[in-house]
């Protein structure tokens, strides 16, 4: 079925030939037609292939700082997303706020709705550039935590949290879009994996901060929020290590600046090598030398399949229930029987998830996206099975000291497997699906749907938990998440293409035949 959805010859026109040695098991081949008027001579193409291999090796050293600085945006995203889980209890103890159930829900959900709006505005990167848009988000990440820490009342706290949510949405779009456009195809997955890894680190640090400040009055919730400004300040201080992406500069016909950015990314490369790489990029981009596409333009036939696949993988990431275990993880483990140790237990689970993300970074470009996704989703289903079993056994009256471990191990398996599958896939793959002219709009729209799904799932959990109280209710909720994991498994098997080792300009899903196959498979 996957081969039917994105088949080989003739489906996608005007794309470069993919070398046989780059095809891995599970790879869904693209068209094998040569480039049209923009084609390069065979001898030059061979030289450029060797050049790209050298640049990929070199970027592992000289480009690490660039990728790390860009990924600080996802650290801010992770910290500002996760810190609310530990800060809520402290705010509820503050007499000036009196945080109730409704206010607690508003504090969490306002950031998610704002993130959806922020993801839409990520299209501004088409106008001002990837670098400026990324640093603009960092500036908001610097101001919002300070405003939350200084808020004298709930309304101002809510407004500052909403501002933080907008920067969360913008950075979710721009970080991997930036990394994708500065990375060679042979190591794009590994470098793109830095974003979810550092994002998970931000969540982990937020849990550590919350656990450390628990003994202080009102758990020092203002300090918890305020510390979120530090990584943003660090990113702004290191902004000199963030050159603009050569692809964006070439799309703006600024060839000299593009060459200068390549020199910063590959300082040891000879000038002739850089000229050859620029020629390759220009040849690739001339296939899509059209005006930038806005959100409405994604409905056009040539971008529709890319949008369907991108939106699907982003929504499936959220309906698996992952952020329920991030926002309400301490509460779930508290209900399971861990009591005062629930926050520490959640921190340990996040540490395991971070280790799993490190494994992903190591092997994603060797194994491929699809095999890791399939194995990870099966692991997520195993984790949810343990959590459902623990909840049912607890409801049946089995001793809590036994059933609690089902919940902990289930959450551990779920989040670790998530980091090998639905966790990194939207980060790494969404920007790979779209052509240059539609990339900012496409990634922005897909991530807006991601955050809207996040909002819906996060808001539904406390509502369902209240409507169906007790252990049996939790078992039903976890069973719903397991159902969507099955849907995700089928989606990956039937529709998700392998993009490992393929140049961005070769990853084309907009052919009309491909679109018809995608529609019939869905």
Image: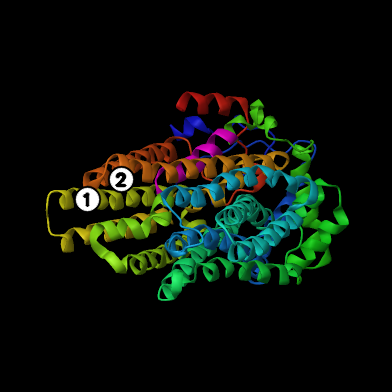
Q: Residue furthest front?
A: 95
Query: Which residue occupies 53% across, 60% down?
Result: 78
Relative to 371, say whether 464 is above or below. above
| Circles 1 and 2: CB atoms closer than 8 Å | yes
Badge 2 local density, few (<14 within 10 Å), some, or many (20+)? many
Number of numbered markers: 2
Q: Is residue 234 visible?
A: yes
Instruction: Determine whether the residue tagged by mark 1 lies in a helix, strand or loop.
Output: helix
Q: Find residue 115 and report its horizontal and vertical position in percent.
A: 59, 48
Q: Find residue 439 and report its horizontal and vertical position in percent.
A: 67, 43
Q: CA distance from mark 1 to mark 2?
A: 9 Å
Residue 407's image quarter? bottom left
Residue 478 badge: 2
Query: Which residue occupies 34% across, 50% down?
Result: 380
Q: Quick one: 308 or 213, which is closer to the camera?
A: 213
Q: Main secondary structure of the magenta part?
A: helix
Relative to 286, say whether 45 is above or below. below
Residue 404's image quarter? bottom left
**Is residue 477 in the magenta section?**
no
* Colouring scheme applied when the structure was drawn: rainbow
Magenta stretch?
307-321
Badge 1 local density, few (<14 within 10 Å), some, or many (20+)? many
Query: Which residue occupies 56% across, 52% down?
Result: 428
């Amino acid at each position: 079925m996957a081969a039917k959805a994105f088949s080989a010859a003739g489906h996608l026109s005007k794309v470069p030939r993919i070398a046989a040695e780059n095809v891995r098991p599970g790879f869904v081949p693209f068209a094998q037609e040569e480039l049209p008027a923009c084609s390069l001579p065979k001898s030059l193409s061979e030289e450029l292939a060797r050049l790209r291999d050298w640049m990929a090796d070199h970027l592992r050293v000289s480009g690490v700082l660039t990728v790390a600085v860009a990924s600080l945006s996802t650290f801010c995203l992770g910290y500002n997303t996760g810190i609310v889980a530990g800060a809520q209890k402290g705010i509820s103890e503050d007499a000036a706020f009196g945080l109730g159930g409704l206010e607690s829900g508003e504090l969490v959900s306002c950031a998610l709705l704002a993130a959806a709006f922020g993801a839409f505005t990520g299209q501004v990167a088409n106008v001002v550039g990837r670098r400026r848009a990324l640093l603009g988000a960092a500036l908001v990440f610097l101001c919002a935590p300070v405003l939350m820490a200084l808020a004298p009342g709930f309304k101002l706290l809510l407004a500052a949290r909403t501002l933080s949510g907008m920067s969360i949405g913008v950075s979710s779009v721009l970080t991997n879009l930036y990394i994708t456009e500065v990375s060679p195809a042979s190591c794009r997955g590994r470098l793109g994996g830095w974003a979810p890894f550092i994002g998970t680190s931000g969540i982990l640090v937020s849990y550590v901060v919350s656990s450390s400040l628990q003994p202080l009055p009102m758990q020092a919730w203002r300090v918890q929020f305020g510390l979120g400004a530090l990584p943003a300040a660090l990113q702004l201080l290191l902004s000199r290590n963030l050159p603009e992406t050569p692809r964006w500069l070439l799309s703006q016909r600024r060839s000299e600046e593009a060459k200068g950015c390549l020199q910063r990314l590959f300082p040891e490369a000879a000038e002739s090598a850089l000229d050859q790489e620029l020629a390759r990029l220009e040849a690739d981009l001339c296939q899509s030398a059209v005006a930038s596409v806005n959100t409405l333009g994604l409905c056009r036939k040539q971008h529709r399949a890319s949008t369907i696949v991108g939106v699907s993988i982003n929504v499936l990431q959220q309906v698996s229930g992952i952020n329920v275990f991030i926002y309400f993880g301490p509460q779930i483990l508290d209900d399971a029987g861990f009591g005062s140790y629930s926050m520490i237990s959640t921190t340990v689970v996040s540490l395991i998830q971070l280790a799993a993300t490190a494994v992903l970074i190591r092997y994603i470009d060797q194994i491929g996206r699809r095999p890791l996704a399939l194995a990870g989703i099966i692991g997520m289903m195993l984790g949810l099975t343990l959590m459902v079993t623990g909840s049912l056994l607890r409801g049946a009256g089995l001793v809590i000291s036994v059933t609690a471990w089902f919940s902990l191990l289930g959450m551990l398996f779920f989040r670790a497997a998530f980091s090998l599958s639905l966790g990194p896939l939207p980060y790494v793959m969404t920007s790979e699906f779209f052509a240059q002219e539609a990339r900012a709009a496409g990634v922005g729209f897909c991530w807006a749907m991601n955050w809207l799904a996040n909002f819906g799932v996060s808001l539904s959990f406390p509502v369902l938990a209240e409507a169906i109280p007790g252990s049996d209710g939790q078992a039903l909720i976890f069973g719903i998440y397991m159902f969507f994991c099955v849907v995700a498994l089928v989606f990956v098997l039937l529709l998700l293409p392998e993009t490992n080792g393929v140049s961005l300009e070769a990853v084309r899903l907009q052919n009309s035949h491909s679109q018809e196959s995608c529609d019939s498979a869905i």
